[in-house]
Amino acid sequence: MCVCSAGAPAPVTDQHDDARSRTAARAARMQNSGLMVKVYSAAVLLLDVLVLLVRVMAALGESLFRLIVPPQEKSVVGEVVLITGAGHGIGRELAQQFADLGATIVSWDINAKSNEETVQGLRKQGFKAYAYTCDVSSREEVLRVAEQVKKEVGDVTILVNNAGIMPCKPLANHNPNEITRMFDINVFAHFWMLEAFLPAMLQNKHGHVVALSSMAGVMGIPNLVPYCASKFAVRGMMEALREELRLDARDPRVRFTCIYPFIVDTGLCHKPRNRFPGLLPIVKPKNAARMIITAMRRDQAEASLPGSLLPLNHIMRLIPLKAGNLIKDFIDSGVEAHDS
């Protein structure tokens, strides 16, 4: 007969059973904990989606409301407005209408004579206006003249990048120098102007940048291939810059407006083609300037001239390409090739 003392260790099999039980218990707890984490994460995600849907519906409602009741237009009294290409066309009309609203005008143009005519016309009416001759395609010249403006006028608070050129001919008829010149003026000049004036706007948390793209920067148009490419670039630059600053934690409060004119009667397009002028009217520079200023004062991110074209283009992008081409062929609107 075997007698075991009271202090003898437990059999090995019992120890193994206890270890397995503890391991199983820990596994069960971990499984339950993991399940709870998954349930919690799913609940948080569901709540986030519901909040997102509510906010999206509120934003859509606000947009529909603003179609009926447009936002109040902000004042530009006392603002310093710099307009490139202000010696003629849309630029000159912008200078006049901004001045009428109480802004100080800084007029830039490569043509000193026409630029001075714009400024002298404003001064005769008692407005504050300053003329500077500048080739905006030259970074060095832009930065040099910008420093002069800062010393003589002060910080620019509204920048309107309006200068541009638009040769109308097939791509095969362009030479490399023409294409390079077009991008220097239509695209790179925007970067040099932003380099010169955007930092002060960000520092002061006050400012507005308006860029003239084109409906040729929204859709491809024959006889304008390099021009379309340059205006698509402006559109992309403005959209990306607006998004970059929207996500900036410093909340810089600088606004951006990109404008897409179709055909404006400025002389750049000598041979417009328009089957339905009532549907797609050629806009006068005075009316174009008024619509641009209205869009800017309402803090619109983008606007087309006429206003119906941008929504129409969005709809056209939703239908099959062949169907869209049939509609464009029916409307038959564009520009004919011509020598500059």
Image (cartoon, rainbow, N blue to C red):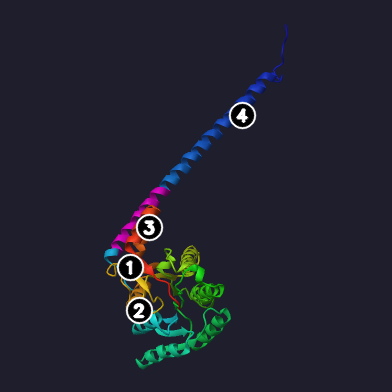
For the residues labelled 4 and 2, the Cα–Cα distance comes to 82 Å
Asked if the stretch drawn in magenta spans residue 62, the answer is yes
Please tell me whether mark 1 sits on a helix, a strand or a loop: loop
Mark 3 or 2: in front is 3
Mark 1 or 3: in front is 3
Q: Is residue 300 visible?
A: no
| Disc on the earlier residue, 2 or 1 | 2
Residue 278: which disc?
A: none
Along the line of sight, the residue nearer the viewer: 220 or 13: 220
- Residue range in magenta is 48-66
| Disc on the earlier residue, 3 or 2 | 2
For the residues labelled 2 and 1, the Cα–Cα distance comes to 15 Å
Residue at 30% of width from left, 64% of height from top? 66
Quarter-of-image position of residue 311: bottom left
Q: Label 4 is placed on what type of residue?
A: Thr
For the residues labelled 4 and 3, the Cα–Cα distance comes to 69 Å
Above or below, comparing residue 241 to residue 204 in the picture:
above
| Residue that numbered label 1 is attached to | 307
Residue at 47% of width from left, 86% of height from top? 111
Q: Is residue 175 visible?
A: yes
Residue occupying the far bottom of the picture: 124
Looking at the image, do the residues carrying marks 4 and 3 touch, with CB atoms under 8 Å apart? Answer: no
Q: Mark 3 Cα within 10 Å, few/some/many (few <14, many 20+)?
A: few
Please tell me whether mark 3 sits on a helix, a strand or a loop: helix
Residue occupying the far top of the picture: 1
Q: Label 1 is placed on what type of residue?
A: Gly
Please tell me whether mark 4 sits on a helix, a strand or a loop: helix
| Residue that numbered label 3 is attached to | 325
| Residue that numbered label 4 is attached to | 23
Mark 4 or 2: in front is 2
Residue 285: which disc?
A: 2
Looking at the image, do the residues carrying marks 1 and 3 touch, with CB atoms under 8 Å apart? Answer: no
